[in-house]
Amino acid sequence: MTDHSGSETMSDSNTHTATGYRMDVRDPVTVLLPTVRWTTACDQVAAQLRADDELFVICDREDDPVAGRDPPNGVEILVAGDPEGCTAKANALAYGMERATNDRFVWSDADYERDDDWLDCLVEAGEEHGTAAVLPMFPGGGWWRLVEPVVVLSLGLQAGLLRGDGVPSYPWGIRCSLPFISQAK
């Protein structure tokens, strides 16, 4: 679609973003969402899936509330089992990665809401810049202000994963090997 000046703009079918990336031809992704409850975020991510995308909502046990849910198309509920020697989140992510059919992954939490183009924007950032990571910042007052320093301090950890040129030392979009998954557990 072009505007009055003849420049290409984002079309209604979301074929191009503001940076020109063709979202209609992006590679499929597997979204891993560890949670014990179905949340608004689960619905929001499910609504953003493309035909070959996968959304794995991953819980620990069969008696977790989400385990018995009938998910929408493109969504699979996985029961990872109780973790051994790692956190429940690491166990869930490793379990989901072992079952993924796509080579690109999005790891996320289920406790915040997303914009309608969240998944496409995150995939675009990964395509353009390599590994994409998002850290929450909670501007304003209230009790969130108490956890804000923790988020800022975690930037040190993120910086430790960089090669020196600002690029993470692990490439975005390359399937993690099974040894990595074993180490995550």
Image: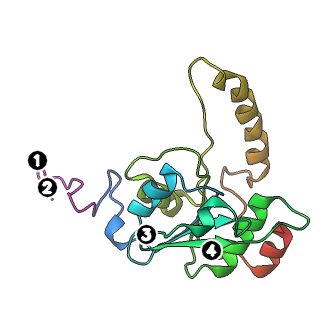
The residue indicated by pointer 4 is 174
Magenta part, dominant SS: loop
Q: Check if mark 1's residue and mark 2's residue have beta carbons within 8 Å.
A: yes
Element class at badge 4: loop
* Residue 144 within the segment the image draws in magenta: no
In the depicted view, which residue is nearer to us: 60 or 159?
A: 60
Measured along the vertical axis of the image, is residue 65 above or below residue 175? Answer: above
Residue 172 visible in the displayed image: no
Q: The magenta stretch spans which residues?
A: 1-14
The residue indicated by pointer 2 is 2
Q: Please identify, in this view, whether the residue under mark 2 or under mark 4 is nearer the observer.
A: 4
**Residue sitting at x 75%, y 39%:** 154
Identify which amino acid the numbered label 4 is placed on.
Answer: Ile
Identify which amino acid the numbered label 2 is placed on.
Answer: Thr
Q: Please identify, in this view, whether the residue under mark 2 or under mark 3 is nearer the observer.
A: 3
The residue indicated by pointer 3 is 72
Q: Check if mark 1's residue and mark 3's residue have beta carbons within 8 Å.
A: no
Identify which amino acid the numbered label 3 is placed on.
Answer: Pro
Q: Please identify, in this view, whether the residue under mark 1 or under mark 3 is nearer the observer.
A: 3
